[in-house]
Every structure is written in C-alpha cells, then in structure tokens.
Amino acid sequence: MFRIKIPRYWRHKDFRYRLNAWRCNHCGEVHFFKPLVCRKCRSREFNQVSLPDTGKLLAYTVVRSPPEGFEAQSPYIVGIVELDDGTRILSQITDCHPEELKKGMRVEATLRKIREDDEDKIIAYCYKFRPTV
Amino acid sequence: MVRMSSVVIVGYGGYVPRYRIKGEEIARIWGRDRSELPTEEKSVTGLDEDTVTLAVEAARIALKRARIPPSKIGAVHVGTESKPYAVKPSGTIVAEAIGAVPRITAADFEFACKAGTEALQFITSLVDAGRIEYGLAIGADTAQGRPGDALEFTAASGAAAFIIGKNKNEGVAEIEAWTSYVTDTPDFWRREYERYPHHTARFTGDPAYFHHIVNSVKNLLENDGYTLNDVDYVVFHQPNTRFPLVAARLLGVDLEKVKPGLVVGQIGNTYAACSLLGLVRVLDQAKPGQRILLSSFGSGAGSDSYIIRVLENIKLKRDLAPPLDKFIDRKTYIDYAIYARHRKKILM
Ligand SMILES: [Zn+2]
C-alpha cells in the first residue's frame, strides 16, 4: 500500500507546483527545495527564484516497471529537461507518445497528477513537461 | 438587470485535453444507431489530468494574456461538478499553482453546466464593488456519463478561465451587462457518493434548456435595452450539436452569429467550461467594437446571460498565448478500451 508523506509534499509545493526554487546568495547554486546549507559553498543564505517554465528535452526513457505508487499511469516517460536558464531538471513528460519524442525538442511545464495515496486518497500534483503547444 | 460600471476581461484562456473518442466508437460498443449521434467526437482527459489540472492549464493561459502579477488576483472561483475532492476546495490548489495565494478568497461553485458563468458573476461583482482589483473565474469539468447512457456520447473535459479587472486600458472585452434566470427543474442530478448522474429525458429540452435560455436572453435584452441587432456573435450552452441551433431559431438569431462559438461537435459538452469555451473561441476571432451575447445553461435549472463588447486591446493580447483551436486540433483518437481506462470506468 502506497502512502504519501503529506508534510513533505506540502513543504515542497512551491517547487512542485510552479518551479519556485532557492538560489544560494553566495555562489548562485540552485536548490529545488530549501536546504539548511548550500551543498556547494556551505552558505546559509538563499533567495527564492522562479525557474523558467520552458526548455528543451535532453534525454528520455520509458518507465515500464514503475516504483510503488506510480503504477496507475504506467508506462510513462521520464526525461531530463534543460530549462531556458540552463538549470537541468528530471521530470515526467506528458501528453505525448514515446515515438513522438526527439532529443532537443521544446517542452513547457504543466501541472499534473503524479500519484494518489492508497489509504488517505490525497492527490499529489506536480510539474510535468509536455511538447510545447 | 445588472449594469456594470466598468468591468473588463483582462485575460482569457481555454484548454482542452489531447485525447478524443468518436461518437461512432461509443455507438459501436453499445450497438446504437450511428446515424444520429449527438456530437461527432468528444475530448477525454489524460491519465494524469483532473478538474484541478485542467483549471490550472486554462488559468495559466489567461495569465499570459492578462500580463498582471498573479499576486494581484484577489479571488479564485472554480465552477465545476467534478471536483477531485468532495471536501477540499479546488480553488486553493489552482491559486497556489498560479502563485495567487495567500491574500485571496477562494471557493468552488456548483450549478451543473452553468457553474462557470456563475463563478464569473461573482468575480465580476467583486471587481465591480471594488472589493478586489483582479479576480479569476474558471469553468472546468471532467464530466462523467454512465456507460451506455445517452450522456456518455457527450460528457467531455475542458476548462476556460477569465481574469477580470476594472481598468479599461487593460481589457480585451468589457462585460456590459448580465442576468440570471433560475427555477427548480429536475432535469439532471447526481446524489452524493454516486459516480454517474441521472436525468429526466423528457425534461432536457423544453422545460429545462430552452425555457431557461430563451427567458434569460429575453430578460437581458429587454431590461438593458439591447436588441439582437446589437450583437455580432451569440454563444449558447452546447449539450449537443442540435440544441444551440434550435435555441437560435426560437430567439430568431441568425445562425451565422452562432457558428463561430460552436465547439461541441469537436470536443463534446465540457459542462461548466462549455459555453465559456465557446466565448473563448469567439474572442480568438472577434474584432474590436463587436458585441457577444453569451448564454449558459445549468441543469437544476438556470441560465446566465451576458453582453460582452470586444475592446481594442484584443489585437495585442490575443497572440500572447495559443488560441483554443490549437488545443482542439491537437488530438489523438483512442478506442473505448483506452477511454475506459482514462475515465476510470474499469474498477478493480
Ligand atoms: Zn552556495
């Protein structure tokens, strides 16, 4: 039975819903979720930044044996997207079939359901990317 | 009945999911006559979509056209009959996703297929009263029809969003007037814990759809001093391809004024989004100075009618986001088996 850790899901919603991340004031490293210290320079000061919602697809694969909690949408596509500011992000790719994908194709962020809690039924929403409309 | 001082649409957006099922395919499964289908095809959500995600798609398109910071939005109202949660507002999730939280009021409205135009009334009134600077009204649904039921041919998915403000210089269109016409008419309903709605087939046309739309339009024209000659486009609620054309005939509306706003043949009845997607399609092509008459219908029953005048700004803002036809033309056909999986009709 798959359970969603609701406090963690709630803490991460700024990034999961609209790609609001944290940039280190000292070295500029981008952290998706607010860390205590920067993994690069150990600074403790961050500014919230909103990452661009468009980019290009660098690589992708089709997941046919999903981890627990992801079965309902299987098979699905996972890809690495390079956002227009150069940030790289791992994301599901939606609204397309694997045969339509091309390396380097333009993609845009959208909000979709990722999974549901089997017991409490809460729905986890998260960004996914899709071919630019 | 309700004259607005100056309330404008500053941004609008329509969204339709990618998948389609043909009416013929549904007819094949249930052995129905394929010669008289209520629509050619209808839109179907992807496995990862629900009313909230559809609403967010439309809202983000509307924001691109509005060009305002989302934090200035003071109210987010979602009209729907297919909330993902029975208790937990869709509006809060939508508001969070577009960055409009936390200084907002948010709520979901339900009035069958007119919940979207109802949300628009309240946003319009809040702006008109000066309580908020901008507000977001959305009609969104992932409508369900019982397998084999007549409604299964039409019950579809989509969303339309409108950002309302007061500054005419920002507006793409001005909301000049609106009215409502409501009675207790049991034409269509769904009780709690039920998956599919029930309907009184005999009531659907005359005492419900036609009676409420005709009276709401007549009231609006008479009370606010408009005639049909003042309007260039007429958008009706579209439960099937036939009803809006009959409504036009009953009111004496030229069919050429109705056709640009007809989307039901390609995407089905998207319930709370239905007439609003018709409005989106008209805004995608209308010229400054032209007037649009919009008339929704919601079972239970009621109709909201609006007079909307297109402003000069439409020419600048229209192209800031994809037109509705881009989403209508972006389609992948699925068969009934895949449709049953997408719409969670297979229960394990
Ligand atoms: Zn750092």
Image (cartoon, coloured by chain):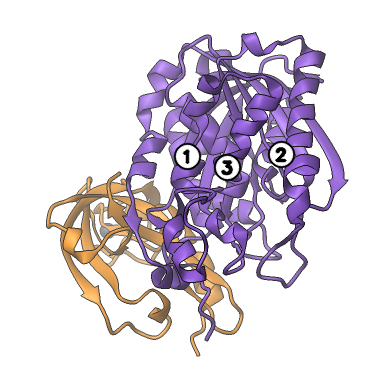
Chain colours: A orange, B purple
Q: Quadrant of the N terminus of chain B?
A: top right
Secondary structure beneath dot 2 equals helix
Q: Residues within 10 Å of mark 1 (few under 14, many from 20)?
A: many
Q: What residue is disc 3 on?
A: B274
Residue B305 in view in this figure: yes
Q: Residues within 10 Å of mark 3 (few under 14, many from 20)?
A: many
Disc 3 with disc 1 on a shared chain: yes
Question: Mark 2 CB in 8 Å range of ligand 1?
Answer: no
Write down the chain letter for disc 1: B
Under mark 3, the amino acid is: Cys
Under mark 1, the amino acid is: Gly
Q: What residue is disc 1 on?
A: B14
Under mark 2, the amino acid is: Glu
Q: Is residue B121 left or right of residue B83?
A: right
- Could you say where residue A46 lies in the image, as x and y percent from the top left? 38, 54
The relative height of residue B157 versus residue B120 in the rendered view (above or below) is: below
Secondary structure beneath dot 1 equals strand
Q: CA distance from mark 2 to mark 1?
A: 17 Å
Whichever of labels 2 and 1 marks the residue nearer the N terminus, that label is 1
